[in-house]
């Protein structure tokens, strides 16, 4: 069934669905939940909420309401764990100005938590993940390497400082970066999550008239991820991302193997990948750094050819 008011749906790899209610108003909807990736229940709640809200921010929308989604092993886990998760999630929702309106809980052998989120946006200001134009600069707002680090956390091999750095990054909202990109003006945006930087970049150029060049030396990443990847802490999702998207990606032989791993590494609550006109990029980057998005960096550019491909140099 087709509906002319559905301006972003399942037909493309958009980060959230967008439905127009009027010429001035559209609703943005998304849902996301997953298993714990850190040991702290409170931090897990914060990260899960930040991750779910990120889809709304990637569209340029404002999240308004949320509903909790909980799968909990009531027979084998103490309820205090769930209370801490929900407390962490609620704390992050309040930071984002989002109202919790309800939710649903089911008994499950494996703990999971996340949100269904509804927000609003002006129909003409919606930002698609496609739409990048030749000459645009690419800005990434958070460092990579989260999947490698969380794999090391599960293996008991990440130190407290590394865990803290990763947790702070994952729990940081993409709200400020989203607000700033709307002020400056951008052509396309997506949030970098489970498909990794290269996977989501591929979605931005697939079946379009443009390609991308990514300068691997300019990409921000956690230094600890390089060492941990060398020790073998590589998530299975990294291999799946590489197997799936390698046919669209040309990687220079000069790019180190550890960097290839980091570029395909699946992220949780990663940053925004933004394509903005070249003359807007300096102002956007400056504003981000001034407003606390300190890791934001220009990592490449949009090119006319080869169409639908990513070149990593």
Image (cartoon, rainbow, N blue to C red):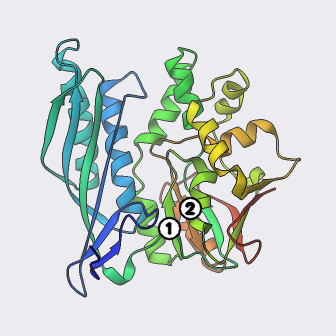
Between the C-alphas of marks 2 and 1, the distance is 7 Å
Q: Is residue 21 above or below residue 199?
A: below
In front: 106, or 122?
Answer: 106
Earlier in the chain: of badge 2 and badge 1, it is 1
- Residue underneath mark 1: 129
Q: Residue at x 22, y 40 (%)?
A: 69
Q: How many marks?
A: 2
Seen from this angle, which residue lies furthest right? 254
**Residue 182 position by quadrant:** bottom left
Horizontal relation, residue 62 to residue 151: left or right? left
Seen from this angle, which residue lies furthest left? 102
Q: Are marks 2 and 1 in contact (CB under 8 Å)?
A: yes
Secondary structure, mark 2, is: helix
Question: Residue 109: x and y, percent?
Answer: 27, 20
Horizontal relation, residue 79 to residue 19: left or right? left
Quadrant in which the N terminus is drawn:
bottom left
In front: 109, or 172?
Answer: 109
Q: Residue at x 59, y 46 (%)?
A: 143
Secondary structure, mark 1, is: loop
- Residue underneath mark 2: 203
């Amino acid at each position: 069934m087709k509906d002319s008011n559905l301006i972003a749906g399942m037909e493309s790899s958009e980060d959230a669905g967008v439905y127009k209610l009027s010429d001035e108003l559209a609703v943005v909807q998304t849902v996301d939940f997953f298993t714990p990736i850190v040991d702290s229940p409170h931090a897990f709640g914060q990260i899960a909420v930040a991750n779910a809200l990120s889809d709304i921010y990637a569209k340029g929308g404002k999240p308004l309401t949320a509903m909790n989604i909980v799968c909990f092993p009531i027979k084998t886990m103490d309820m205090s764990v769930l209370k801490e998760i929900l407390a962490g999630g609620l704390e992050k929702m309040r930071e984002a100005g989002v109202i919790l309106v309800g939710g649903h809980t089911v008994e499950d052998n494996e703990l999971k938590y996340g949100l269904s989120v509804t927000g609003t946006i002006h129909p003409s200001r919606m930002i698609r993940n496609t739409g990048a134009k030749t000459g645009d600069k690419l800005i990434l707002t958070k460092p990579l390497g989260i999947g490698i680090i969380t794999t090391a956390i599960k293996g008991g091999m990440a130190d407290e400082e590394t865990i803290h750095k990763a947790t702070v990054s994952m729990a940081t909202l993409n709200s400020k970066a989203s607000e700033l990109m709307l002020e400056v003006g951008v052509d396309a945006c997506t949030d970098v999550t489970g498909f990794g930087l290269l996977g989501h970049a591929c979605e931005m150029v697939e079946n379009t008239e443009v390609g991308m060049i990514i300068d691997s030396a300019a990409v921000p990443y956690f230094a600890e991820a390089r060492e941990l990847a060398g020790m073998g802490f590589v998530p299975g999702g990294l291999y799946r991302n590489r197997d799936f998207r390698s046919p669209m990606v040309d990687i220079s032989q000069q790019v180190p193997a550890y960097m290839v791993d980091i570029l395909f590494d699946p992220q949780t609550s990663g940053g925004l990948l933004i394509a903005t006109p070249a003359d807007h990029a300096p102002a956007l980057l400056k504003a981000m750094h001034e407003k606390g998005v300190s890791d934001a960096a220009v990592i490449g550019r949009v090119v006319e050819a080869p169409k639908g491909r990513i070149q990593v140099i």
